[in-house]
Image (spheres, rainbow, N blue to C red):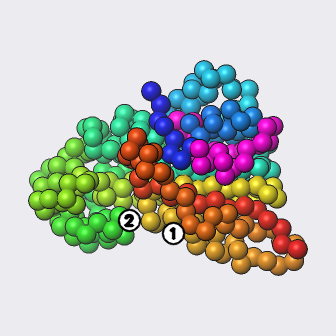
Amino acid sequence: MYHEPVLKEEVIAHLQVKEGQKYIDATLGDGGHTLAILEKGGIVLGIDINDQSLERAIHRINSAGYGKSFFPCKGNFEHIDALAEDTGFNQVSGILMDLGYSSFQLDESDIGLSFLRDSPLDMRLNKDLGVTAADLVNSLSEKELTQLISNYSDEKFAKSFAHAIVLSRNLKKIQTTRQLADILKSASSPGYEHGRIHPATRTFQALRIVVNDELGNLERSLPRAARLLLPGGRMIVISFHSLEDRIVKMFAKEQERIRNGAQPWLKSVTTKPVEPTSTEVQSNARSRSAKMRVLERKVYL
């Protein structure tokens, strides 16, 4: 019924959850990680931009009997500092950012994140955002589409896919996920990626990233989140593609250079990102690309 959170045991172990202390789940989703923190006695502010996700998480957590320690909040984690200040979570022992999408968001929602079902080609997690994926594929030039697909997904067929999109939209406006997926499939080569992934996978990823400004949100949220941590507090970020992981990695390197007097700084807890076990990958194929980085707030003396 609910999405199984990635690296759940590893998250709880590295957060070092303590009873009665405050934590922020900045990307609540179905609330699986939050529920695990609540079970350990933590108090959680759960942030999500999507109304459906919030409703599902609230129902799940209330049904489990942890509603009194859970504070749901609608908002973009880009504004984590303001949201935390407004809800009394301006000093916390841990922060989690799981940058993936729940199975519900990908497979069952009607916002067009997945091509597994035919939905309007929207992709906006927040309907207040102005530009949809359909707007992009129907208005960008072939060169701009090529750059978008290539830059945000490393798709080697970016030029061919962009050309196919332009040819197709000249005949009929592209409005649904199935339309776009069929166009991309027809433009790919036989045996694309040896059948490991659908030809539309990376292009859908690129469009989703751009529509929701995912990389910009992450870059802006990391320093804001760091300032909310108590000394000894930890921040965990789970990413699912190299662009996200690179941002977190570079942020961590920059933080470790801040050693001026008693100024707070963050230090990486693990030398390499934590990855799911083979057992988890077998039971949850979507976890295969997950990488978890753990940072801890220190005070340099």
Q: Quadrant of the C terminus?
A: bottom right
Which of disc 2 and disc 1 is earlier in sequence? 2
**Circle 1 residues within 10 Å: few <14, some 14–19, many ≥20:** few
Q: CA distance from mark 1 to mark 2?
A: 13 Å
In percent of the image, x 33 and y 68: which residue is there? 154
**Rendered location of residue 122, percent (x, y):** 35, 45
In the picture provided, is 223 more to the left or to the right than 134? right
Residue type pointed to by label 2: Tyr
Residue 152: mark in rendering: 2
Q: Is residue 297 above or below residue 60?
A: below
**Circle 2 residues within 10 Å: few <14, some 14–19, many ≥20:** many
Asked if the stretch drawn in magenta spans residue 250, the answer is no
Residue type pointed to by label 1: Arg
**Rendered location of residue 104, percent (x, y):** 42, 35
Residue 246: mark in rendering: 1
Q: Is residue 284 above or below residue 154?
A: above
Where disc 2 sits, the SS reads: helix
In percent of the image, x 59 and y 40: which residue is there? 33
In percent of the image, x 22 and y 49: which residue is there? 181
